[in-house]
Image (tube, grey):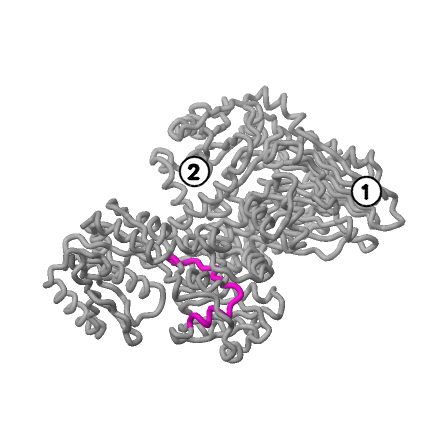
């Protein structure tokens, strides 16, 4: 079997979706019947590494739109048995390559109708739709009226890569966290979306004891506004913006946190929850987006209504008071092995 | 649902609590809680607490009030329902709390012990409660943000008395019956008595969304304003970018369905008040889908309207059949209305021009043995369904044009006042909702038909001296909700809905020992969807409509009318509904004495 994966980013990419695509490629490549997985990325932010055997990573596709289409068309000549469309915006291209692609849906990109009605019509040509979470699946089905098979394939966590670590002294010093209890959110600071819940946590922080600090880990264009907001709330000295951080520091960054809190409104799933839990950090997620599924409806962490500051505050106080670090056993549900099992159940059926 | 009482002789020179008074207040609210009742007086007789209970959750005797916590240090009397109590209970148990019952009442006690007054932000539901803390010797009094459940207080400077009804406080015998001109003026201006005023000078409402402590010697502390509709809209105006994340219709539907699901929590069968309007029909459709038991639906019908456009019964019957509900069409005749009128007026806690419909539909639910009923009340306030959402901005624009000057010569009294009142939200709202106008009520007694002064003098008096009604209206939009929609929604929810619709739903249903629940009046729902309704004004009603069959959805909107004009021999009052005459006769029968 030859698989073509058209995606936004994978190897060398940041964030949950890039990792998801890497896992997808690796899981497909691990199948005995698989000859090759061709991964065509739209962007490559950092140097790609650890590309598994059987995976062909077409790095040249990331040069631009024309290069991307050219690379996809070249891949078409290899006659792939399965074309996976890794983003709704790539659907016209995927449909130009095959009659019936497999469509992946992650988060807000699939939560409301597309601007182009043409692409909306193409949705009905898909062989099947795979969603990262129930909320994404349900919201996608609500507007698209897609009637074909809709599968679930949540993110996977490589538990062996994480674990409970001591706080790294240099990071504690760099961010001025000596003697502080630390709340943390990891994510992109996007001014146009504002769905991660940074605002909500900042507002609550003002009500919490002075020894509680808040680390916002991630880069983005909304930083200046959030910094101003922290100043207005009189808590600027308790808020740390790490900016974009190197991937190697990520695990040590999680080790700084006492509570991972992300009262978001637009997460398709919230892979960062799995990373926090795998680092032994207790987590607070949202009742109203994919976070509730990452936290297994409250089994792995606390769920709050992002529109209610009192609930966010109470949950933070509860977890700060608990002062424990442990990796919940229920996290196994998202192991890479389970991911492979789920994927194999999906891919055998349509192929 | 319940009626609650508390008396605290907080100054050492005040006389101790008398059990006769506590019992008289509590027992006068027997209809609010026919299932059980009790009182408790501290050994030093400084504090007394009483409650009558209508059992809805945990029907066993363990739910009886007043209720102590496991340590017997806190005691509570609670009227209402906390819909997220199971979730709160789980959170408390994770923290090691122990419970002896499975009631929302005990959850409140444990939550107060853990969080103090911060607890209020966590509550989803309708509530009015009093907690006495025996350790700190302090009382905590709180009421829900929408003011769904009533609570009144009378403080003579040494003893504070609290109860669910104004009449109950009077029944104790220690509170003066003197009529408050401000309350009277409020009634004639708006058709109901606006908070915090009541019809009695010595009694005030505990304002919606507020709480306070009462300490020994010091008495009442600062009023804590824990949440308000205006504040939610203000926050929402800053959260508008989040409204675009998903399709507005889908998000609204998810949240409304969740609210209905919360309001279905009960250990008794549940009914729905069904008109053929969009809000109540959509509510019935969702509830019947989510409910495990078959749903009971109730619709009122009047002989006077049979076969006419306003007759909702046939449509409601057809819709109830389609959703598989057990339906009752309750026909009310002129004879029954007149037979019930003395009881109706006797049960009325404070004068109001409305409540006849909920009186009879609650009666129907009671006759069918249903204790809990959902109502579509609040849908128009939440989703912008009232004409005021369009009229008030138009009025305000018009008031600034020369046309307003021309209109001051109009024969229509409200048009004549456009220039004077139409320039502000509060003033325009008064013109939109006003029953009588400020110059029509007496400066001395507030009455619109008194004989204190000559008509000439009354015409000069405006606004009423003891009640600045515009100031009350301004308070409903403070802090500024930030958008025209937010301001009008806050005015509607904090004035007409709170003082009229919710008050009437409370006393008329309680008179029949029925609990009315309002899934559209839910502060958690409001917080969740306020950014959405600001961004997508038209979507809300469309979403509800999409849950209905086209034959019901696409018919023109009709108001719900009770044929009071046909039933009563009311003198003409310059209006088609004769509501002004009805107001005068209600006032004579209730507070006039």
Which mark is drawn over residue B142? none
Precedes in sequence: disc 1 or disc 2: 1
Quarter of the figure that contains the N terminus of chain A: bottom left
Position of B164 with respect to A72 (left or right) is: right
Local packing at callout 2 (Cα closer than 10 Å; few below 14, some 14-19, many 20+) is: many
What residue occupies the far top of the structure in this picture? B335
Q: Where residue B84 sits in the image (x, y, percent)?
A: 55, 45
Q: Label 1: which residue?
A: B42
Q: Residue at x 40, y 55 (%)?
A: A332
Q: Where residue B431 sits in the image (x, y, percent)?
A: 56, 48
Q: Can residue B195 be seen in the rendering of this structure?
A: no
Q: Nearer the viewer, residue B514 or B470?
A: B514
In the image, which residues are magenta?
Answer: A250-269
The reply to whether label 1 and label 2 mark residues of one chain is yes
Q: Residue at x 67, y 41 (%)?
A: B78
Provide the secondary structure element on which disc 2 rests.
Answer: helix
Task: Find out whether residue A259 is within the magenta segment.
Answer: yes
Q: Where residue A269 sits in the image (x, y, percent)?
A: 38, 57
Q: Label 2: which residue?
A: B286
Local packing at callout 1 (Cα closer than 10 Å; few below 14, some 14-19, many 20+) is: few
Q: Nearer the viewer, mark 1 or mark 2?
A: 1
Q: Where residue B250 sits in the image (x, y, percent)?
A: 38, 49
Position of B586 with respect to B333 (left or right) is: right
Q: Nearer the viewer, residue A174 or A197?
A: A174
Kindly indicate whether the residue at mark 2 contacts the one at mark 1 (C-beta within 8 angstroms).
no
The answer to which image quadrant residue B115 occupies is: bottom right
């Amino acid at each position: 079997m030859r698989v073509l994966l058209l995606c936004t980013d994978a190897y060398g990419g940041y964030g949950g979706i890039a990792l998801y695509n890497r896992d997808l490629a690796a899981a497909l490549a691990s199948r005995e019947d698989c000859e090759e997985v061709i991964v065509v990325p739209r962007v490559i932010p950092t140097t790609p590494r650890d590309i598994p055997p059987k995976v062909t990573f077409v790095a040249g596709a990331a040069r631009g739109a024309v290069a991307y289409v050219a690379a996809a068309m070249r891949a078409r000549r290899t006659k792939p048995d399965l074309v996976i469309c890794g983003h709704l915006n790539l659907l016209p291209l995927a449909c130009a390559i095959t009659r019936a692609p497999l469509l992946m849906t992650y988060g807000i990109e699939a939560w409301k109708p597309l601007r182009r009605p043409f692409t909306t019509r193409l949705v009905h040509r898909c062989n099947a739709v795979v969603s990262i979470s129930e909320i994404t699946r349900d919201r996608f089905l609500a507007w698209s009226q897609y009637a074909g098979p809709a599968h679930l394939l949540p993110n996977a966590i490589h538990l062996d890569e994480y674990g409970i670590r001591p706080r790294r002294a240099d990071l504690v010093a760099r961010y001025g966290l000596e003697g502080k209890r630390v709340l943390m959110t990891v994510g992109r600071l996007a001014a146009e979306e504002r769905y991660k819940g940074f605002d909500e946590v900042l507002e609550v922080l003002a009500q919490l004891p002075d020894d509680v600090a808040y680390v916002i880990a991630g880069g983005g264009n909304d930083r200046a506004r959030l910094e101003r907001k922290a100043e207005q709330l009189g808590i600027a000295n308790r808020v740390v913006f790490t900016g974009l951080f190197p991937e190697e520091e990520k695990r040590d960054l999680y080790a700084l946190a006492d509570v991972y809190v992300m009262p978001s409104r637009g997460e398709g799933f919230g892979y960062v929850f799995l990373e926090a839990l795998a680092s032994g950090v207790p987590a607070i997620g949202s009742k109203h987006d994919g976070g509730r599924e990452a936290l297994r409806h409250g089994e792995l962490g606390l769920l709050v209504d992002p529109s209610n500051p009192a609930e966010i505050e109470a949950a933070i106080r509860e977890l700060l008071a608990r002062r424990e670090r442990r990796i919940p056993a229920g996290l196994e549900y998202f192991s890479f092995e389970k991911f492979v099992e789920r994927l194999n159940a999906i891919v055998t059926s349509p192929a | 649902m319940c009626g609650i009482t508390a008396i605290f002789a907080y100054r050492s020179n005040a006389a101790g609590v008398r059990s006769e008074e506590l019992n008289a207040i509590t027992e006068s609210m027997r209809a609010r809680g026919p299932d059980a009742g009790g009182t408790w007086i501290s050994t030093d007789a400084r504090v007394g607490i009483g409650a009558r209970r209508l059992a809805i959750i945990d029907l066993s005797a363990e739910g009886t009030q007043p209720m102590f916590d496991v340590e017997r240090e806190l005691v509570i009397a609670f009227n209402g329902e906390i819909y997220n109590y199971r979730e709160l209970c789980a959170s408390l148990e994770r923290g090691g709390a122990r419970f002896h019952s499975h009631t929302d009442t005990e959850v409140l006690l444990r939550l107060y012990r853990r969080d103090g007054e911060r607890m209020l932000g966590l509550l989803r539901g309708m509530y009015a409660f009093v907690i006495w803390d025996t350790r700190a010797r302090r009382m905590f009094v709180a009421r829900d943000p929408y003011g769904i459940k009533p609570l009144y207080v009378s403080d003579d400077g040494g003893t504070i008395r609290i109860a669910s009804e104004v009449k109950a406080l009077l029944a104790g015998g220690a509170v003066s019956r003197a009529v408050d001109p401000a309350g009277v003026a409020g009634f004639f201006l708006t058709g109901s008595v606006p908070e915090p005023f009541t019809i009695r000078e010595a009694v005030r409402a505990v304002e919606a969304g507020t709480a306070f402590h009462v300490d020994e010697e010091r008495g009442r502390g600062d009023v804590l304003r824990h949440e308000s509709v205006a504040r939610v809209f203000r926050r929402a105006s800053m959260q508008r970018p989040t409204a675009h994340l998903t399709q507005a219709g889908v998000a609204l539907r998810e949240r409304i369905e969740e609210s209905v699901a919360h309001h279905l929590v009960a250990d008794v069968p549940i009914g729905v008040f069904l008109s053929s309007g969009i809000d109540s029909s959509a509510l019935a459709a969702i509830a019947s889908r989510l409910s495990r038991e078959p749903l009971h639906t109730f619709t009122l019908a009047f002989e006077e309207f049979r076969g006419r456009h306003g007759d909702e019964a046939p449509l409601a019957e057809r819709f109830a059949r389609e959703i598989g509900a057990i339906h009752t069409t309750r026909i009310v005749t002129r004879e029954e209305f007149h037979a019930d009128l003395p009881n109706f007026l006797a049960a009325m806690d404070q004068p109001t021009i409305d409540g006849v419909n909920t009186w009879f539909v609650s009666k129907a639910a009671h006759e069918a043995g249903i204790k809990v009923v959902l109502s579509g009340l609040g849908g128009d306030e939440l989703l912008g369904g009232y004409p005021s959402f369009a009229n008030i901005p138009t009025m305000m624009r018009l008031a600034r044009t020369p046309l307003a000057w021309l209109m001051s010569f109009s024969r229509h009294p409200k048009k004549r006042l456009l220039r004077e009142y139409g320039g502000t939200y509060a003033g325009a709202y008064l013109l939109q909702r006003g029953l009588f106008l400020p110059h029509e009520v007496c400066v001395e007694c507030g009455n619109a038909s008194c004989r204190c002064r000559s008509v000439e003098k009354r015409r000069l008096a405006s606004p009423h001296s003891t009640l600045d009604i515009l100031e009350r209206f301004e308070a409903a939009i403070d802090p500024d909700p930030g958008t025209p929609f937010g301001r009008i929604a806050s005015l509607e929810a904090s004035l007409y809905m709170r003082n009229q619709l919710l008050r009437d739903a409370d006393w008329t249903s309680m008179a029949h020992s029925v609990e009315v629940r309002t899934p559209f009046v839910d502060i958690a729902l409001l917080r969740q969807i306020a950014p959405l309704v600001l961004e997508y004004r038209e979507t809300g009603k469309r979403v509800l409509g999409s849950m209905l069959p086209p034959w019901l959805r696409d018919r023109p909107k009709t108001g719900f009318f009770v044929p009071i004009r046909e039933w009563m021999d009311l003198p003409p009052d310059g209006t088609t509904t004769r509501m002004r005459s009805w107001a005068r006769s209600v006032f004579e029968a209730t507070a006039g004495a």
